[in-house]
Image: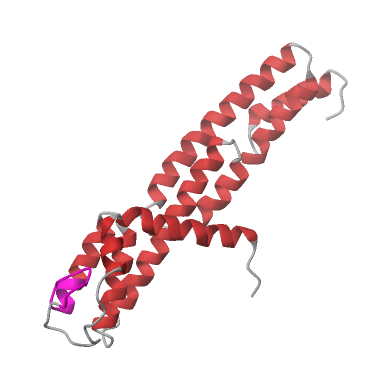
Amino acid sequence: MKVSGGVLTLLIALGGAVLGSLGSQVVAFLTAERSAPAGTPGRAATGLLSKAPTAGERLFEVDQALQTGEFGTALLLAEEGQRLFPGDPRFSGKQKRAEDEIQNRFRYQTMQAAIARLNFAAAVALFDEIPGDSAFKSKATGELASAREQYIAEQLRDGQAAVKLALCDEAKMSARAVLTLDSENAAARGLLAECDKSGTSP
């Protein structure tokens, strides 16, 4: 499978996001002893990220990390749980959830950057990639809606000012920028109609 530049950037960013969320815990984990054999529950092995002796306690720790948004920590705890309890499928499910949320966090942050650059087409595409059950969906929904409304209002103000100065090219640019986001926007269509009356073709 060919890996595009965008996918490669995503993978690199995801690695940075995981490391950035763990701090000293990652260092301790990566430098820990790996002497404890897999599948030996009931013993707190040295060098492990978690000292919880049972699968249930470890799953509780993973859930806590997920709930507090510490997705990198949740990922490492879930991977550790799979090594120690290879017959318990719950750890793989937790791992998948943590990986998905790390990806969703990157999509959300990239969406914010797109909004800051007024690239609403990219922002909307990134928003659509965030699943509805993600912890980042509600944040993204509010931010995208607010930024979209502000952008439309600014474009309409600029377009109306341009019409008053008989600058129809500028007015049409503003109107079309609005219609890209809201194809039924009456004010934007009104700007195009005013330019039509002035004898300038749309």
- Relative to 150, say whether 75 is above or below: below
Can you say whether 4 is above or below 126 in the image? below
Quarter where residue 90 is shown: bottom left
Which color mode does the image show? secondary structure
Q: Quadrant of the N terminus?
A: bottom right
Q: Residue at (57%, 30%) from the top-left corner?
A: 151
Count of marks placed on residues? 0
| Residue 118 placement (x, y as % from top left) | 59, 35
From this viewpoint, which residue is outermost toward the top? 165
Answer yes or no: is residue 153 visible.
Answer: yes
Which quadrant is the C terminus positioned in? top right
In percent of the image, x 70 and y 29: which residue is there? 175
- Which sits in the foreground, 199 or 143? 143
Q: Is residue 50 magenta-colored? A: yes
Q: Main secondary structure of the magenta part?
A: loop
Left or right: residue 195 compared with residue 160:
right
> What range of the chain is rendered magenta?
45-58
Residue 127: image location, x then y, percent: 51, 51
> As drawn, is 23 to the left or to the right of 109?
left
Residue 79 is situated, as x and y percent measured from the top left of the image, at 32, 74
Please say whether residue 130 is visible from this viewpoint.
no
- The quadrant where residue 167 appears: top right
Q: Residue at x 77, y 25 (%)?
A: 193
Residue 41 image offset from top left, x and y in percent = 16, 84
Q: Residue at x 37, y 53 (%)?
A: 20
